[in-house]
Image (cartoon, helix red, strand yellow):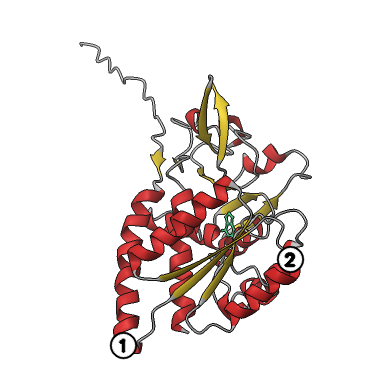
Amino acid sequence: MAKIVTHFPRLIILQVMRILSGKEVVQARRKKIAEKVQQLKNNKGITPGLAVVLVGEDPASQVYVRNKAKACDEVGINSFEHKLPAETSADDLKKLIIELNNNKEVHGILVQLPLPKHLNTDEILQCIDPKKDPDALTTENMGLCWKGTPRVSACTPSGVMAILDYYKIEVAGKEAVVVGRSNIVGKPMAQLLLMADATVTLCHSKTKNLRKYTSQAEIVVVAAGRPLMLGKEDFKKGAVVIDVGMHRELIDGKTKLCGDVRFDELHDWVSAATPVPGGVGPMTITMLLENTFKLASF
Ligand code: GUN
C-alpha cells in the first residue's frame, strides 16, 4: 500500500499593522461639523465663535494658531485672534479673558499653551468661564469629566477616541495604558478610556519598570513628551499603539518630525499604530472645532 505523506507548509502568521490615519478621520468629521454649523446658523441664528489667545512668539504655537483660524474658516466658525507680547502681565491677560467671557460672539476661549514662564498657567486658565472652555482645563470641566458627565472633553484625547471609533477598535473591557499624566492629555485620556469601559493604568515619569505595564496592554497611548522613547520591545504583539508625541529631531543629518514611539519598528508586530505626522496631530484642531460648536449650541 502506498504511503501517503502529507506536507503542510510551515505557516508563518505575520501581524499586518494597520496605519491609523488621523487625516482620514479629519476629512470625515470636518464635513459633518460644517453641516452642523450651518444648521445652527439657519435654525437659531447662532454662528459659533472661537477666540484664540497667543502670548509671545513661540514659532510652533504661531503655526498652531494660524492653523486653528484656517480650520475655523473652513467649517464656518468665526475666529478671533488675540496676539499679545511675551512680557504681557497676568493682570492684562486676565482682563482680556474676562472681556472674552462677556463677549456674546465668543463661545470658546483657547489660551495657547505653553505660556511664558512668568505667567502661572493654572491661575490664567481658571479665569476662563467654564461654559466657554473648549480645552476642558478649568477645574469645573475637569471635575465634570471625572464625574463622567463632561460638558466637553479635552481636544487631543477626544481625537484619540475619535480615531479608535473610526477604525472600529473595541475599547470596552480592554487593558489600556496611558503614558504621561498632563492635565491636557494624560489625565483626560485615562478618563475617556475609563468612560469607554477600558481597564486603565496611568503611567508617568516616576513609574518604575514602565515596560512591565506597556508590554501587557492591548491599547497603549503614549504622551510622554520624549522623542522616540518606546519601541517594539515595549509593546505586546497585536497591541494598538497611539502616539501623541510630536517632536522636531535631527535624524541622519536632517530635521524630521517624530513621535514618542519608534514607529518603524512596529510593522509585523503591533496590530495598529498612528504615524507621526498624520496620526493624532490633525485630530486636535478638529475636536476643538467640535467642542466650540457644542459650547455654542448649549
Ligand atoms: N498647545 C498645544 N496643544 C494645545 C491644546 O490642545 N490646547 C491649548 N490651549 N494649548 C495647546
Query: Which residue is depicted at the point 57% across and 66% down?
Result: 110
SS for dot 2: helix
| 64 is higher (above) or lower (below) than 47 | above
Q: Amino acid at mark 1?
A: Asn
x%, y% of residue 170? 45, 56
Q: Considering only order in the chain, which callout, 2 or 1, is on the residue closer to the N terminus?
A: 1
Residue at which label 1 appears:
43
x%, y% of residue 249? 57, 31
Q: Amino acid at mark 2?
A: Asp
Give left or right: position of 171 versus 144.
Answer: left
x%, y% of residue 142? 66, 71
**Residue 147 seen:** no
| 213 is higher (above) or lower (below) than 130 | above
Residue at which label 2 appears:
122
x%, y% of residue 7? 29, 17
Query: Which residue is depicted at the point 52% across and 73% down?
Result: 108
